[in-house]
Image (cartoon, helix red, strand yellow):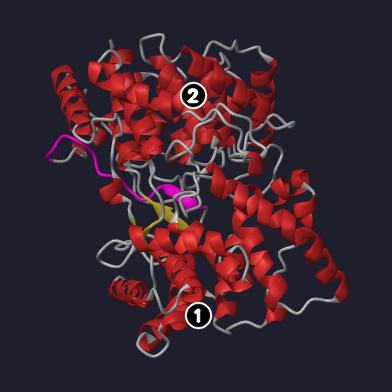
Amino acid sequence: MTTVQPDTDALDQAISEGAEALLLSQRADGVFDYSADNLTSTLGTVGALSALHYADPDGSADLIAAGAGWLRRTQNSDGGWAMVPGLDSEAGPTAVGSAVLHLVDPEGSASAVSAGQRWMTDFGGLDAIPHPEVVSWCRQYYGFVGWLGHEEMRRFPLEVALLPGLHRKLFDLRIPMAFALGLAQARHKPLNPFHRLLARLGKPHALKAIRQVHEHEGSTGAWCENAWVTGLVCTGLARAELAPDLVNAAVGWFRTTMHPDGWWQTGPLDAAWTMYAVRGLAEAGYAQDQRLTASAELFVRLQQHRPFLAFGCPPGYWGWAGTAGWPSTLETSEILSVLCRLPGEQQAKAIDAGVGWLTRMQDSRGSWGLCVRNTKVANSGPCPMTTVQAVDALLDSGIPADDGRVRRALRWLSEVQLPDGAFESVWYRHHTMATAAVLETFAKAGRADDETARRATAWLERARQDDGAWGDGHGAPPTVEETGWAVSGLLAAGTDPASVRPGVSWLLDRRDAGGGWPSESVNEYVRYVSRYTNPALAQGMALRALGRYRDSSR
């Protein structure tokens, strides 16, 4: 394929217009706000409806009716639901969406429930969902409405609450939800005498963990500022007839957070939007732009200086949302890398604290997960992409490539590389972005010629589509996010700019009328089950790729 060299002036203009379009989304407090693209949520609405049904069915009848109406209106024509309305139907949202409609409005929503269950039958049922944890949550909802019997329900072992180190590794960030549903099971699920004894012993410790998270977040009535998570916790506690103060607080939170159209959000992503936007701008030449000062100050404010006791996390981390959010290696790593690229000394202490947190959270095997050391829990355990984001942050902060933390991580990455040269990612779909990110990290550590890096490079070159862009590496149409990350990773590894020129041209052609780029559902809310878009990621990755191409072509 012959591709014309992008004109330098056209490239500069695209970067300039893209940057200005991105900066239009910045609020005065420094947040790059894409809430309008991410707030509506089938899962958030399902969580709220089940909680209100069990906790306050009469007092919240108006909210329940509004939420049920919204679910019926947003059902796809094929009978399914997506996490975000308007996208292709997904099994998880369809299973719980149809179940909760049957729970709260069995007569008025009968046709919608039937259509949803037909979609699930065609899909293959719950057992066809490629994620055991999601199957477990869905089975809970099927149990609520009598579609499954008690004997078919997974038991949440409350006795592990007696051993904090164990329950963190078993449940990870699902601790509040798992314990709340376990408390409900202890009341409703037939248990043998031994399991009843264990549940009785674990009960106060499970309640303590749930309350710890609630109080850490300021006792707002929510857990994780997330209607789905809060819904699971409130549903479990209400069915268990425990902690009425927490249940009432959750009901009050649901009442104040319902959108007038009848839906609830999954949760804000202030830090996640902002970190990708600012990093893209910084790598496109805008690090010195005074408008980014507010975002740098925001990151310093958002860093948490109290331990997150329920997860056993020390202070010094960032979450994906507000100042009392849940800890996340992904956000901590990306924000650290951003702060290291911005001028000034005001963030030096924040960088030091973040490096200390990452150091203490590295798994003994060399990897990083989301927020608990040495867990193997699906969707938050050891992840190649999360690991390289942590390594990038260490390297960006000045840690040398021969440091033990870096060497252990790179060794682990080499061990988990797939046979075809690609890498997995928990939080981004399939393999393109993870493989590009790993390649970039090896190059940054001075190991672009390692066998691991060479195999990653070869995979990315094979995954490139005929138009020069990248999709997921398995036949999906190309996206800005994946193309931007692939171009950036290959350039970081020293690839000849001419070889990625078609991808750069594709990015230039994909610009919209406002100068920005379209975003796609490449972000995994639950891997293989529910996805969402992050427009800041699309804008940031496009700018990062164009900036690197411009710099490497000079």
**Quarter holding residue 369:** top right
Tell me: 283 left or right of 352. Answer: left
Q: Examine the residues drawn in magenta and state their main secondary structure.
A: loop
Residue at the extreme front of the image, as rendered: 245
Amino acid on which the number 2 mark rests in the picture: Glu
Tell me: 184 left or right of 517. Answer: right
**Quarter holding residue 494:** top left
Magenta-drawn stretch contains 521: yes
Tell me: 201 left or right of 246. Answer: right
In this picture, is 506 found above or below 232? above
**Image coords of residue 302 (percent x, y):** 43, 30
| Residue drawn at 35 percent across, 88 percent down | 108
- Crowd tier of the residue under label 2, counting other residues whose Cα lies within 10 Å: few below 14, some 14–19, many 20 or above: many
Residue at the extreme right of the image, as rendered: 194
| Residue drawn at 67 percent across, 52 percent down | 208
Q: Work out which quarter of the rendered image holds the C terminus and state it.
A: top left
Residue placed under numbered mark 1 in the picture? 121
Q: Which residues are magenta?
A: 513-526
**Image coords of residue 371 (percent x, y):** 60, 39
Residue placed under numbered mark 2 in the picture? 440
Q: Nearer the viewer, residue 518 or 294?
A: 294
- Crowd tier of the residue under label 1, counting other residues whose Cα lies within 10 Å: few below 14, some 14–19, many 20 or above: few
* First reached walking from the N terminus: tag 1 or tag 2: 1
In this picture, is 177 found above or below 112? above
| Residue drawn at 60 percent across, 25 percent down | 357
